[in-house]
Image (cartoon, rainbow, N blue to C red):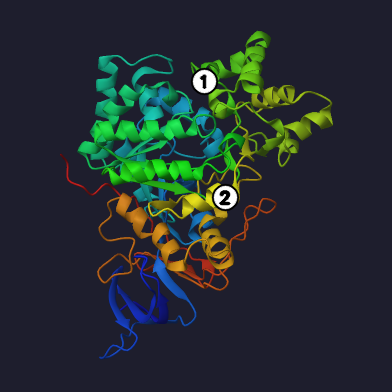
Amino acid sequence: MDTVFRDVRVIDGSGGPSYRADVALSDGRIATIHREGHVGPRPSARHTVAADGLALSPGFIDMHAHSDLALLRDPAHEAKAAQGVTLEVIGQDGLSYAPVDDRTLAEVRAQITGWNGDGSDIDFSWRSVGGYLDRLDHGFDGHGIAVNAAYLIPQGTVRMLAMGWDDRAATADEIARMRQLVAEGLEQGAVGLSSGLTYTPGMYASDAELTELCRVVAEYDGYYCPHHRSYGAGALQAYEEMVDLTREAGCALHLAHATMNFGVNKDRAPELLALLDAALASGADISLDTYPYTPGCTTLVAMLPSWASEGGPDAILARLQDDASAARIRQVMEVDGADGCHGVPIEWDAIEISGVSDPALSCYVGKTVARSAAERGEEPWVTARRLLIEDRLGPTILQHVGHEENVRRIMRHPVHTGGSDGILQGAKPHPRAYGTFPHYLGKYVRELGVLPLEECVAHLTSRAAARLRLPDRGLVREGYRADLVLFDPETVAAGSTFDVPRALPTGIPHVLIDGRFVMQDGKRTDILAGRSVRRSAPRP
């Protein structure tokens, strides 16, 4: 054997009771589990870890990550490795970097600079989904990446590639082209399709168009992961729309960052859960993910009305620079409620700037737009408009609009999984990027008792693996891949806070991928064991 964990508390990911055992690894897999009290010799290995007092669980699966470029930029990637994350699902919210051509690559790089940086430090050698996954496999000089990654085909990028940024219905030929792009991406290894239906140009798609793409996903046994049309006004109707759409397509549904935010949705989580329970009872295949925090995080440009974004980043900047267009945008945002802000009038005192692309604008970071405006003696819209123009749409924001009771109710649901929605850019990112998984275990399990430890681990491991159709991950079982986390249930906690968002967690000494230590004794090793995790279901 390569490694044995001696006298460890096994929390196997099933949700069942934990037990004590020796767990031995060989050739990247779990070779032997010798339970306490079993007869026969205990396993031995070249490397023995005395694990008394520690829990051993499957590696955590981040079902909603924005590490699309970070995995190629940062070989250590401690933001996720130190949390015990062994697999991230990227390509989220309908916008990412494959499939593309030269035009759309430039456009999407500009549009999501706030999520991933402008990519000037990345060699964009790929254009297809398969090429991007190959690039992840190659990683750093052929040695892979920090953690594993699965990819969702981004519907907004697909639409951009097939028909540009027009706010109109797709033609039959354009739908056929989009279906072809989705099928090619799935054949090349993507696990499903994502949408960002409050982001342009993905939001311009009708339900009929989305249904046609989901039919392709269903043929490949993938899943649809929408950031749906509203998390504010009309949130329940937006959830129901996704349930109905995927039922029509016969496609599995995974609801991204399934929150109930804004004042209009306070204490309404039970209504969402009742909707999901009714759909599940009728045979629907549904899961969801959440992060264990109340504020959200996105880009400032995403708050604009969709019509202001038609034509892409250059067209947005032109409208912001035109006084008449800017006045129309302001009216929709502050009075009517923009679709980019989920149909709710924007509250500038709830919009905190978390990052900018231009360091010269760092004076805005860590302050709400309302506060920066007051310091300058101007109205908040004037400040926001100038910042968008000067930073060329680059600012990221924290949006303080969540409700704690909604967060707790949703995380208890049996189809819940964990997703950080972690944006790693900016001087003051959301702490969920560095803290989601230990925060679940420390605050919501140990301190608040919202979930039992074994149940919470199941949410973060096997339930996510089941959604991804991974046959040998997500459980501590003989023969399964040795993607594992050892943590101390009594001390595990997120180190990151809103004031110190990049602090690493405590109480997670060891993390392994394919039996190789990527974290050992609380420190990042130089091991690059991560690779792309590709769709394993057979072609239709």
- Say which quadrant the N terminus sits in: bottom left
Contact? badges 2 and 1 (CB < 8 Å): no
Give the residue displayed 29% in from the left and 14% down from the top.
171
Give the residue displayed 58% in from the left and 63% down from the top.
448
Secondary structure beneath disc 2?
helix
Direction from residue 13 to residue 363 in the image, left or right: right
What's under tag 2, amino acid-wise? Answer: Glu
Residue nearer the viewer, 188 or 183: 183
Residue corresponding to mark 2: 405
Residue nearer the viewer, 438 or 293: 293
User: Taking 163 as reference, is 199 above or below it?
Assistant: below
Q: Is residue 77 visible?
A: no
Q: Whole-percent x and y of residue 494?
A: 59, 61
Q: In the current view of this chain or complex, which residue is farthest to the left?
A: 540
Q: Residues within 10 Å of mark 1 (few under 14, many from 20)?
A: many
Q: Determine which of the numbered discs, if any, sits on residue 294 in the image.
A: none
Q: Residues within 10 Å of mark 2 (few under 14, many from 20)?
A: some
User: Taking 331 as reference, is 127 above or below it?
Assistant: below
Q: Whole-percent x and y of residue 358?
A: 66, 34
Residue corresponding to mark 1: 306
Give the residue displayed 51% in from the left and 28% down from the top.
111
- Say which quadrant the C terminus sits in: top left
Q: Is residue 205 visible?
A: yes
Q: Whole-percent x and y of residue 349?
A: 72, 34
Identify the image quadrant of residue 392: top right
User: Taking 298 as reference, is 104 above or below it?
Assistant: above
Is label 2 or label 1 in front?
2
Q: Whole-percent x and y of residue 142?
A: 36, 53
First in sequence, mark 2 or 1: give its number: 1
Q: CA distance from mark 2 to mark 1?
A: 31 Å
What's under tag 1, amino acid-wise? Answer: Ser
Direction from residue 521 to residue 29 in the image, left or right: left
